[in-house]
Amino acid sequence: MDPMSGPNTSYDPVAVAALEPAALEAAVAAAQAAFDGAGTLDALKAARLAHLDKGAVALARREIGALPPTAKAEAGKRVGDAMAAVRTAYEARETALQAEAAERILVQERVDVTMPVARRAVGARHPLELTQERLMDIFVGQGWEVAEGPEVESEWMNFDALNLGKDHPARQMQDTFFVDPPDGGLVLRTQTSPIQIRTMLTRTPPIYVVAPGKVFRTDDLDATHTPVFHQIELLAVDKGLTMAHLRGSIDHFVRAMFGDVRTRVRASYFPFTEPSMETDFECFVCLGGDPLVRSDCRTCGGSGWIELGGSGMVNRKVLTACGIDPDVYTGFAFGFGIERALQLRNGVSDMRDIVEGDVRFSAQFGMAV
Amino acid sequence: MLVPLSWLGELVDLAPGTRGVDVAASFVSVGLEEEELHGADITGPLVIGRVLTIEEAVQKNGKTIRYCTVDVGDHGQRVTDGIPQEIVCGATNFEVGDLVVVVLPGATLPGGFQIAARKTYGRVSNGMICAEDELGIGEDHSGIIVLERYLGPERAAQLNPGDDAIAVLGLGEEVVEINVTPDRGYCFSMRGLAREYWHSQGSPEGGYRDPARVGEVPRDSTEGYAVHLVDSAPIDGVQGCDRYVARIVRGVDPTASSPEWMKTRLTQMGMRPISLAVDITNYVMLAVGQPLHAFDLDTLSGAIGVRRAREGETLTTLDGVTRQLSVEDLLITDGGQKPLAIAGVMGGADSEVTDTTTNILIEAAHFDPITIARSSRRHRLVTEASKRFERGVDPRVAAAAAQLAVDLLVEHGGGTADDAATDVDVTRPRTAYELDPMLPARLVGVDYSRERVIEILRHLGCEVVDAGGETITVTPPSWRPDLVDGPDYAEEVARVDGYERIPSVLPTPTAGRGLTHSQQVRRLVASALVGRGATEVLTYPFVSATFADTLGMAPDDVRRHAVRLANPLSDEAPLMRTSVLDTLVDALRRNVSRGQRDLVLFEVGSVTRPEPGSSHTAPVPGTETRPAPEVIAAIDAAVPAQPRHLAVALCGEIERSGWWGKGRAAEWSDAIELVLVVAASVSVPVSTEAAELAPWHPGRCARLTLPDGATLGYAGELHPAVCARLGLPARTCAAEIDLDALTAACAEPVKQADYSTRPVALTDVALTVDEAVTAGELEAVLRSAAGQHLESLALFDVYRGDQVADGQKSLAFRLAFRAPDRTLTTDEVSRYRDAAVAAAATAYGAVQR
Ligand SMILES: [Zn+2]
C-alpha cells in the first residue's frame, strides 16, 4: 500500500515512529548500503529513487508537520542530518562510479603508440649548405656582409687581378676548366677569390665581406677530391689592418666552428697575399696530444693539428688592380673549404657522400649541422 | 725537396741527437712545411747476401719463380746446421755468385711493411731479396738490386755476406721532405735550406757554411770556349739568358764511377746515380741550386750560341722525343745553328755525355724564369732544371757551381781542367729598395724595432744601409728574386722573428646590414620546401651535348644555348646546365637505383644562360691600374647570365601507404603546389595557366606567373617519353623556377591588408562549362566579377558524367563574402554571386547547375 495515498491510521501526534532516531539511523544505513551496492550509474539511479528521492528519510520529513511545536525543532534537525548523510553517501558513490566509467573509456580507447608514423616524408637541407650558412652567420653576426659572384667567371677576375699572371707558377698549380674557346677569357672559377675582386671594384673601403660559393677544378671525384666544391673567403680592407687582425678573425672562426682550441701560424705563399700565412688549429677531437708521439686520431691523422687554410695580407698589386690605394689601405683575406669544415665537424669521411645526392645522407642532418 | 740530416749537418751546426722531427719542426717555424719524414721507418735485419743456388720454375700463372739459397753470414736462421737461407724470388735479373740485398724476418721496410717467413709458391721464403722501390731508394721494380752493378765492382768487392746493408746503402739516415712554395726557388738546394734552418736556430754567428763558397774562380777569358748570347725576341723585355759560364775538363776516364758518398746522397735525394758526369751535375745542382749541363765537347763543332728557336726547328731531346720548337723556346746551339738543348729544360740526345765521353763542357747558365716556364709547359717537360729556373736561380752562383763540378770531375774522373774559362755575364745588379723600417710592424701588428728589422734583413743576406732617415736602403741577396716590395720584406721579418709572435686581435667592422634579401629568400624557400618533406641535394652542373634532345626541347628553345667547356671532365658532359632540373634528375635516378621509391628532391643553384650568338670573349687587361670602366663593362658583358634557379623533382608516393591506410602517388598538382608553397613563403601570389614546354607532359604542365605577368617557372608531370629516356620512374613530376625573379618580386616589405571580423557569408555555385575552359580562367572571371567583398574562392568539386553533357564539366566553387564594417545580407550575397555567375556565363558560356 502506498503510504502517502491513504489516511494515516496510526497517527500519534506526540510520537511518530518514523522520526525516531533509531528509525532514521536505520534508514541512513540502508541507503548507504544500497548506494554502495550499486555497481553501475544506472543501479545507483534506482537506489537514489528508493533511498533519497522517495526513501524513508524523505517520508519521515513529511511527518514533522504533525508534531507538536515543541517537538518540531528537534525532529526537524534529526531528519535534516539524516537527509544530508544520505545525500553525501549518494554523491560520493556517484563521483566514484563516474570516475570508474571515465577510466573505463580511457582504457577502451588505448592504442599502440609504438606503431610507426610516417605518413609524409620528413625533409632535410643539404648539410653542406647548412655548414655554409653557419659559417656566414658567424661573420654576419660580427658585422661582416656576404658577397657573391658568378661561377662562370672571367680569367681576369679569377687570375690576373689576383696577381696570378699567365706565367705564374701558382697558376699552373690550378687545374682550371676553360670555357670554349679556351682563349676567350672565361673559366669556371677555381676559387672564391674573384668575388674579392668584384667586391673591391664595386665597394669602397672599409670592406668586410665573407664570400661563399661553388668552385671548380679538374679533379676526378674520389674519396678526398671533387671537381665541384665550395669555399668561403673573408676579405677585409680598411685603414690600419694588420696580420694580428687576420689572426684574430681566424681564431674567432675556429672557436665558433670547432670550440675552444688553439691555433698556430706559419709563413706561406699565395700570389694574392703578401705576407702570407698558413694556419693550423689544435685537433678538437684529441686536443693535440703529445706532439712527438703520433696518436691514431683519425680527425687529425695523429699529428694533433689540423690544417685550416691559407690567408694573408692582400697583395699591394691586387689592391692596385682594383683601384684601392695600397699606401692608404691594407687588407687581409682568408679562405677555407666548406666540404672540409663539414668533413671535420661532422665526421664525413668520404667526399662522394657529399656530392652524390643520396637522400639518406641529407636526411641524417635534418636542418642542423 | 729532400734534406738528409747528414748533409744538413755539414752546412749548419746540428745539436747532437737532433732527430728528423726536430729538423722538420725547425723548418716549419720559418714557414717551410714538412711533407714527410723518410728513412727512420726502416729497421733490419737488412743484410748483404751472396746467391748460392738458383732453382727456376715456371708457375701455373706463367710467372717464373726462383727458389734460391743465399749466404747471409751469421744472420742465417739455420746457419748452425750449415743450411743457407732459403728465399723465394720473383725476379730473374741475377746470377749465382751475385751480391744482393736481403731483408730477413723481423725487419720492417718503408710503409710499415713487416717481413716474416711465409709460404709462397709452395715453399717457405725466409725473407726477401730486395728491389729499389721496396727499400724506398728508387722507383725501379724491374729487378732486384745486384750490388756489383749498383755500387760498382770495386765497392762490391769490399762487401761480405752478412754485412749491414742499411749502412752500405745509407738507409738508416733520416731525410726530411720539405714542401717548397713557388716563391722560394733558392730552397730547391741544400744551400738555401741550410740557410733557412740556420734562421730557425736564431741565425747564430758562424753557424752557416755556404756550400757555394769555393774561393777563387777563373774569370771570363778570351781563351775560353766561345759563347754568344743573342735574343731577338725577349719575353716582356727580359733577355732569355743573361749569364753563361762554360768550363772544360779534358781526359776524364769514361769508366770512372761516382764516389760512394755521392751515390748515397743522390739516392737519398731521390735521384738515380747514372754516370760520373751526370751524377756530378746533379749533385752540384742539389748542393747549390744551379742546374748544370754536361756536353760531350767532341760533339761540338763551333761556338755555343744561345738564341730563340726558329719557325720549324726541331730537336730530339734526351728522352728520345722529337720536339717541334716554338719561336719562344730558348735554345743552346752548336755554332749558332744546330740546336743542342732547350735551354734550362732538357738537353738534346746528340750532345749528351756517353760512356765514351772524355772531354766535357760544363754549362752553368742563368735563364729567364718566364721563358723556361713557358717552354716547360709547352713541351710538357718538368725537369729538375726547369723546376729551378722557373722559380728563380741565383744568377751569381753559376761560376761557383761550375767550379764545384770541375773540381769533382778532376778528382773522381782523373781529368784536367782548362785554365781558361768562359763567363759571359750581362746580369744586372739588383736595385736597392727604400724600406720604411716601420712597415713590418704596421703590416704585421708586432712592434719590430728598427734594429731588429735591420738585423733580420742582414741575416737573410740583404745589404742594409741605414743613414738614420725615414727609410733604410736594402739590397736583396742575389738568390732572392722574390724580395721586391715592402710587404715582401715585412713577411721575411715576421717569418724569421717567428709568426707565433703575431697576436690575435679581432677587427671591428663597420656595422653590417646582415644577409642580403636574396640570401634570406634562399633560406626561406629551402625551409619551406623542407617543411613539405623535400630533401635538398647538390648536383654537378655538367650536362651532355645531347641533353636538349633528351629533354625534347624545341629547336628554337633558348635553353639549348649552353656554355661549352673546352676541357670538360668527361666528353659525356661538356656543357653547363641551363636548368637545374637537367642535373637534378640524375640525383633522382641515383636514389631510385639505390632503392628509394618515394622522393621529393630539390636543388637551388646557378644555371648558365649565355646570350644566343654572343662570342663570350672577355678582355684580359693589365693589372697595373684599375681597368677602365668600359673594360670592366666588357668583362661583365662577356660573363654569361647565371640566374639562380630552384628545381624540384618528385616520384613515388607523396602521402605514404601504411597501417593507417593507402597513400597517394605524387602527381602534377603536387609539383605545382610546391611552387605555390615556395612563393607563399615569401608572400608572392602566383597564378597558373596551361602551358606546353619540354620536358613536361604537354597536357600536364603549368606556367607559373608572377603578379606582373612575368614567368616564374613551370611545374607539372614530366613527359612520359622523357621519363623513359632518362630512366626515371613513370609519372615523375617536376618544377623549375627562376629564384632571382621570385626574389625580385618580394623585394618590398609585405604590406598588411585589413581583414574583417564580421561574420562570413558562404555560397556555392556549380558551373557547367566546356572541357576547354580551365579552372584558372573560370576562377579569374569569378574573382573579377564577385565584387570587393569576396574574401576567398575555392574549387571544391569537379564533376563529369550523366548530369552534364559530353565534352562538358561542372566545376563547383565555394565563395566566401565578408564586408569590413557590417554583416552582409542574404540579398547582397546573392547579388554578388549572381554577378559573378553572369560574368562567367558571358566569358565562357558557363551555366549554373
Ligand atoms: Zn686528433
Image (cartoon, rainbow, N blue to C red):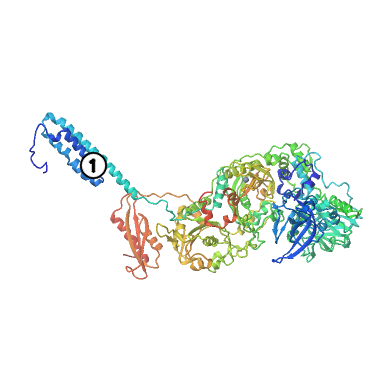
Tell me the subunit letter for badge 1: A
- Residue B759 visible (yes or no): yes
Q: Secondary structure at mark 1?
A: helix
Measuring from the top left, give residue B783's x and y in whole percent.
38, 59
For disc 1, the marked residue is A35
Check disc 1: other Cα within 10 Å, few if <14, some if 14-19, many if 20+: many
Measuring from the top left, give residue B240's x and y in whole percent.
79, 56
Q: Nearer the viewer, residue A30 or B265?
A: A30
Judged from this view, the residue extending furthest toward the front is B81
Q: Within the displayed image, which quadrant is ligand 1 positioned in?
A: top right
- Residue B144 visible (yes or no): no
The type of residue carrying mark 1 is Phe
Left or right of B333? Residue B509 is left
Viewport quadrant of the C terminus of chain B: bottom left
Measuring from the top left, give residue A350's x and y in whole percent.
59, 54
How many numbered discs sit on the rendered protein? 1
Q: Nearer the viewer, residue B24 or A80?
A: A80
Q: Nearer the viewer, residue B551 or B153?
A: B153
The answer as to whether callout 1 falls within 8 Å of ligand 1 is no
Left or right of B465? Residue B508 is left
Judged from this view, the residue extending furthest toward the bottom is B806
Query: Can you tell which quarter of the image residue A356 is in?
Result: bottom right
Left or right of A151? Residue B409 is right
**What residue lies at 17% left-to-right and 37% top-to-bottom?**
A57
Measuring from the top left, give residue A107's x and y in whole percent.
34, 48
